[in-house]
Amino acid sequence: MVATIVSPASKERQRAFYFYENGSLLLEKLIASCNAKPIPIRTFSTQQLFQATNNFSSEKLVKGFSILYKGSLEGRIVLIKRSFVCNAKPIPIRTFSPQQLRQATNNYPAEHLGIYWYKGSLEGRIVLIKHLDNLAYIAINDLVISAQLSGHSNVLKPIGCCLHTPSPFLVFEFAANGFLSDRIYVSCVTELQHQPMVWERRLKIARQIAHALSYLHTAFARPVIHMGIRMHSILLDENDVPKLSSFYFSVSIPEGEADVEGFDGIRQFGFCAPEFKATGKVTEKADVYDFGRILLELLTGEDSLNITRFTIDKDSTLVAYIHNRAQGSCINEIVDPAILAEDGDGGASLQHQLQAVVDLALTCTEEDPQRRPTMVDVTKQLRRIERFVPSLITCIHPNIY
């Protein structure tokens, strides 16, 4: 077997190639996120600007931390700004070299967090580094949507990326307490010897994630649909504040349209909204359905794709099982025993909260998307349930209560 020796020059050309390939994809996604209108920014060469300003010797005005030069560019008089800021804050999304990330993770050891995540130390701070092998498009999508939402306290904030590899590496803030799934799923809690999460905290996390999804659906001119809400896409910081992540398959509804084509590759999974399976198209109500499934997992402690406590037909789902059982079963048969075992004298309040959340989850997972509430309504309802007063536990759809 003959080893192939790659020269440093060839490696540099390869990195440059990937940088431009991934950079163009990133720019394309950024443009698409601006309602498909081109970003009104052009690039000029240094030679053009030197010529326009007569080698930066033309009329100028010092203003604050920059100099404005009068120039002539392509037949029009323009102002050209030259900044000399020393302590400016960096753009939120930074670029890192492959060497920096290898050093940050100690050369990507076999032990990592989940399938795609690595813990690393970069410039004196602990970070999470994500790498999706051979999936450049969805990595760029994840980065762009994360950046758009980075102002929300319940979204995992991106720090930067490395575009010099076939599939970009993404760098995010650190979430010290890991994945929500490891604190909720009975099988994970047992295997990892974690303490089960108390109900009050589960409910608070549900409300915070609901708020993040409401923001996703309403804060932009074109609503964004997450399309991949799972326990593994929610991380927890050191205070158990949830951070929504993994916007791989997120899509925006085009202006003037009621729905949008979802990423066809995920229709095969059992946790998709029924209308997406049937038509390949989605609205914000697809996220409502997925969130309803998250509520059921928080209640039961079960993984929708790996159910251990209930006897469910192989062709059925957790959602279908709870819909069938909730009609004539005691809620105690459904809820995670760890929740029922919690101490305290609020037994009646707990039962009312659990029942209200079951009912809300059932409404969110209605077969007909028109019968589901919006995420804004869901968030409001969860706030009412959190501060439980019997008269405030009102229904979104009276026929199910």
Image (spheres, rainbow, N blue to C red):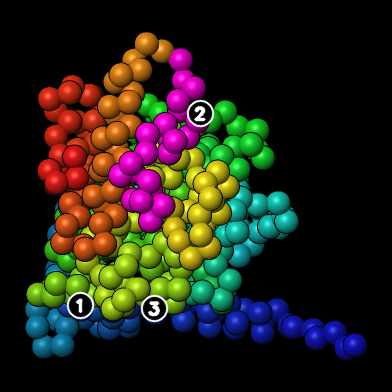
Marks 2/1: CA distance?
49 Å
Which circle's residue, 3 or 1, is located before the other in the chain? 1
- Residue indicated by mark 1: 36
Which circle's residue, 3 or 2, is located before the other in the chain? 3
- Tell me the SS state at disc 1: loop
Q: Amino acid at mark 2?
A: Ala
86, 218: nearer the viewer: 218
Marks 3/1: CA distance?
22 Å
Is 220 located above or below residue 182 in the figure?
below
Provide the residue span drawn in magenta.
320-343
- Residue indicated by mark 2: 338
Q: Quadrant of the N terminus?
A: bottom right
Q: Amino acid at mark 1?
A: Ala
78 vs 188, left or right, is left
Is 302 located above or below residue 353 in the figure?
below
Query: Nearer the viewer's eye, disc 2 or disc 1?
Result: 2
Query: Nearer the viewer's eye, disc 3 or disc 2?
Result: 2
Residue 290 visible in rendering: yes
Marks 3/2: CA distance?
38 Å
Which circle marks residue 264 in the picture?
A: 3
Residue at 9% across / 75% down in the picture? 256
28, 294: nearer the viewer: 294
Query: Nearer the viewer's eye, disc 3 or disc 1?
Result: 3
- Tell me the SS state at disc 3: helix
